[in-house]
Structures are given as structure tokens and as C-alpha cells.
Amino acid sequence: MSLNGQNRADIKIGAKVKIVLKADQRTGKLTEGVVGKLLTKSSFHPHGIKVMLEDGQVGRVQEIIE
């Protein structure tokens, strides 16, 4: 079951996710990576929880792969 990344509790450091980078918001292009840091403090965000990937890219989680 794939989760949509709107609930902070679903996202764990080290999880593989697909995010939308700020630059890709208009196109909706997804970037795959591993969560390094959770940036959103609230438990829920309608556009996806903001994370920083291990490689330093920042975006909102659209899909949790595993």
C-alpha cells in the first residue's frame, strides 16, 4: 500500500519516498530519494510533508515507497 505523504507519522528517516521539488511544483515531476530530515513540524500537511533527502534536495512527499 502506498501512502501519500500527508501525515508526518507515516514518514520515517531513511524511508524511500517520491517528492516534488519546489522547482518542479508546476510540472509535478517526482524525484525519488531517501528521507534525511523531516522539515514540516505539523502532523498533517495537505500538499505533503516537507523533507530533505539524504542528498540535500528539499521537497514535499507525494508518495512513500517503503
Image: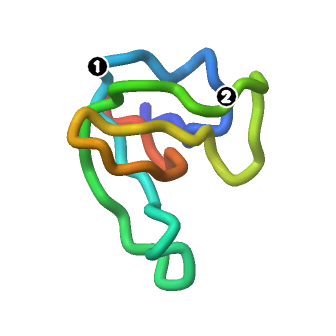
Which residue: 37% across, 17% down?
13
Residue 19 is situated, as x and y percent measured from the top left of the image, at 42, 52
Circle 1 sits on which residue?
14
Q: Which residue is mark 2?
A: 7
Left or right for 62, reference 36 = right
Nearer to me, 9 or 24 = 24
Furthest toward the bottom, the residue is 27
Q: Is residue 21 above or below residue 36?
A: below
Q: Under tag 2, what secondary structure?
A: loop
Q: Residues within 10 Å of mark 2 (few under 14, many from 20)?
A: some
User: What residue is drawn where x is 46% and y is 75%?
Assistant: 23
Do the residues bearing badges 1 and 2 touch, measured as CB atoms within 8 Å?
no
11 to 39, vertically: above or below? above
Q: Residues within 10 Å of mark 1 (few under 14, many from 20)?
A: some
Q: Is residue 7 left or right of residue 23?
A: right
Where is residue 66? Give x, y as percent. 30, 26
Q: Which picture quadrant has residue 31?
A: bottom left
Determine which of the numbered discs, if any, sits on residue 65 in the image. none
- Mark 1 against mark 2, which lies toward the viewer? 1
Q: Is 6 above or below relative to 36? A: below
Q: Residue at x 34, y 50 (%)?
A: 57
**What's under tag 1, amino acid-wise?**
Gly
Q: Earlier in the sequence, mark 1 or mark 2?
A: 2
What amino acid type should be assigned to the residue bearing mark 2?
A: Asn
Q: Secondary structure at mark 1?
A: loop
**Residue 54 position in % (x across, y down):** 25, 33
**Spatial distance from mark 1 to mark 2, Cα to Cα?**
16 Å
Reply above or below: 7 against 23: above
